[in-house]
Image (spheres, rainbow, N blue to C red):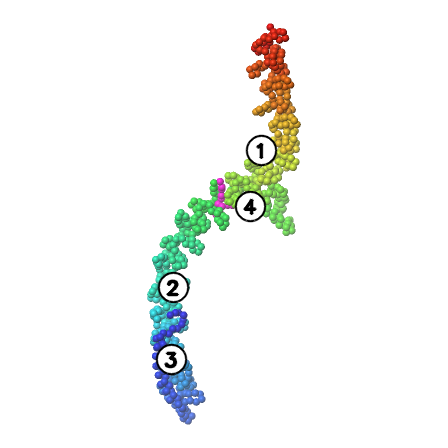
Amino acid sequence: MSLDGKRVRSRSARRFRRKIRASAALSAAVMTAAVGVGAVGYLWYDAYYSQGWHTHSEGTYYIVPATGERATGMQMISNALYLFGEDGIMLTGWQEYEGEKYYVDSSGIVQRGRIEIDGEEYYFADDSGIFRTGLRDFNGAEYYFDDHGFPGSGLTETGGKSYYYDANGLMVTGWAKVHDVQYYFKSDGSMATGFLEIDGLTYCFAQDGHMLTGEQHIDGNFYLFGDNGVLFKGWQDTGEHFRYADEQTGAFATGFRTFDGKTYYFDTDFNLVTGWQRIGGKRYHFQDDGVMDTGWYLEAGFKYYFGKDGAAITGLNEIEGIWYYFGDNGKMLVGWYNEESTGNLFYLGVDGVAWEGFYEDEDDVYFFNPVTHVACETWLNVYETPAENAEKVKQLAADIKLKKKYDKIIEEGKDIWTDLNDDERYRLRLMDDIYKEGSYEQLTMDAYKEIGSGSAFQQYFESSCRMVRGFKKIKGYIFHFDENTGVKDTGWQEIDGKKYYFGYLGVAAVGDMKIDGVLYSFDEKGALISGLTKTDEGLRWRLEEPAAFDDGWVYPDNPESFFLRNSFMDDEEGNRYYFDGRGYAVTEPTFIDGKLCIFSSSGKMKTGFVKYEGDLYYMTETGAEQKQWVSTEEDTYYFGSDGRAAEGWTRIEGVDYYFTEKHTMKTGWLRLDGKSYFLNSGALVRGPIFIDDRLYVFSEDGSAQKGWVIWNNVVYYCTAEGIPAVSTTMIIDGRKYSFTAYGGAYEI
């Protein structure tokens, strides 16, 4: 049995039809015979028809005896029913009368019972001959007649609805089994389909009307019906899972459902889920009883937070006024985290709280925005800009804006006298002098335009989010940030022994820059150039501050005033230079303050022992030594008044010394030109002296001689060179002399 609208006749209905047809045949035969007898011929009395049947060209009619008028309408004549028109003519064929349909045969008799017409069987009411189809009400009971007038039985479709009739054609209501299939027919007899509440219980019937049982998928929902067809509602334990059928609709739940303030989730198989679940791309967690978690949740040492909708939150979120960061899997993060999609850097404390403000990690300092909690990677304006500098930055920004306005006026060919006011034109004239090409002010303006207004801030964080300390080049401009606080330097600063100028914006001056009316030179790293400087014309020594010229005046805008003149200067490596009156390093021997100074071609002053034009000199930081002894670990030298090293016999302060060809002072015994001398610590010895515990006597010229030697009125006689006779007597040239223990001789 189905609900597709087709009519199915039962076997009992066919048996009932055969029974009706048999009884109708007998009645039809009797009625036909009666009409045939009464319809033969007609009688004429004068100008009037006689009573009874008459036929002429108009047709057949019947004169009613009682009235003498033609019969009209439905008339019983000779135990047979006839049907006449309003004109009294007897009707035949299919006719309608007073809302009912009849069939009149060719003899004019209204047919009753079972009749065959044009090869098809029809049934007309046995008593009235009415041809009935469809539903008819008899004494409050409804019957069904098919389109041939026979009483219907079984399932029949009428007006788009299905009905069920018993063997007598009586319409059935309520429960009915048809071929062991359970149906239900509503009070109007129509077959129930879809959901229907019966006696407080819910059932569902298929489109063909049969009652559903078991598991059913209807309109995208899942239902469970008992063997008795009653719809299941409430919780179901399958042994493996729990499921829930809605208390109102009976549909098994899918997705999120809330009961008694608790939220659950049912999967596509209608099963209650527990544990971790990914739903709609989000993570959820359900307790063992299926209740969805919200708020904080701790598992295996990791913390999660579920929003009011139960979804595990991800990313940066505020919870009760405190900010946290949760990973894509919902875990609360701690420590450093770099957001892949944006590159933003966060730091989460051990409690997961997103850091804000400054954070120091070993040697590095970071700053986290108090609102976004993202680590700064550009200029930061936490420390207030000094008021004086802030005012200058404000003026700089105004000047840049005015310059743009002026350039646009010129570009568009407009008149500055009409498009600029007096104050603006006056300021532009001042700017021509302030922002001259190559000036520090122009450098500052260029930096501000290139870097932006952030350059006026006090700290800078590089792309790694670390706070910059020390030197940093930003878009081609040099800045220096305090090694401790990270605050940028401004104005004049001395860093690692070198001077820099950073102005009010913090941009290091480079190249030749006039500052406060003084022209300075800075190297490419911003350091003020001082000390030894190589130029095309020679070496020079640049001063940090301008010096007076020979006339005693200082000219700060004259570059020459920054170079040392007529002075010695040592570089960082200890090399000494001398800069002449023009300010250039001397690169050849020259006399300075009366002393010979020897310089190499590179300008470095030579010190120590120096050979020059065949002579040996000893050079100190002031020039050649004069009238000075110089000793090394091995030798001793003497440099005379002209600075030359002594060679040969040299008298120094009344003492005779002997210096070798290498200018070293001779000590001890000296054999020279066939004579022997003794130099005691370099000094030439004269007279008696003990050498190695032996007495020697040297002559007036210091040589050791044989024979008679007189010293300080004492007469000595040397038997060998310098060796006197002692403690003895000798006959010399025929005379006898006696010699003391110290060599003194007297004649005896």
Judged from this view, the residue extending furthest toward the top is 748
Kind of residue at disc 2: Gln
Q: Secondary structure at mark 2?
A: strand
**Residue type at tag 3:** Tyr
Depth check, front residue: 337 or 501 = 337
| Cα distance in 3D space between marks 3 and 4 | 105 Å
Q: Nearer the viewer, mark 1 or mark 4?
A: 1
Label 2 sits on residue:
216
Measure the C-alpha gap from mark 1 to mark 4. Answer: 40 Å
N-terminal of the pair, mark 2 or mark 1, is: 2
**Which label belongs to residue 572?**
1
Q: Is residue 693 left or right of residue 2?
A: right
The mark closer to the camera, 3 or 2, is: 2
Counting residues from the N terminus, which is met first, the one under dot 3 or under dot 1?
3
Any mark on residue 123, and which?
3
Distance (Cα) linking label 2 and label 4: 71 Å
Residue 291 percent across, percent down from the top left: 38, 54
548 and 174: which is toward the camera: 174
Of the two numbered discs 3 and 4 on the same chain, state the one appearing first in sequence.
3
Would you name the residue on which mark 4 appears? 453
Q: Would residue 464 be seen by someone viewing this image from the given angle?
A: yes
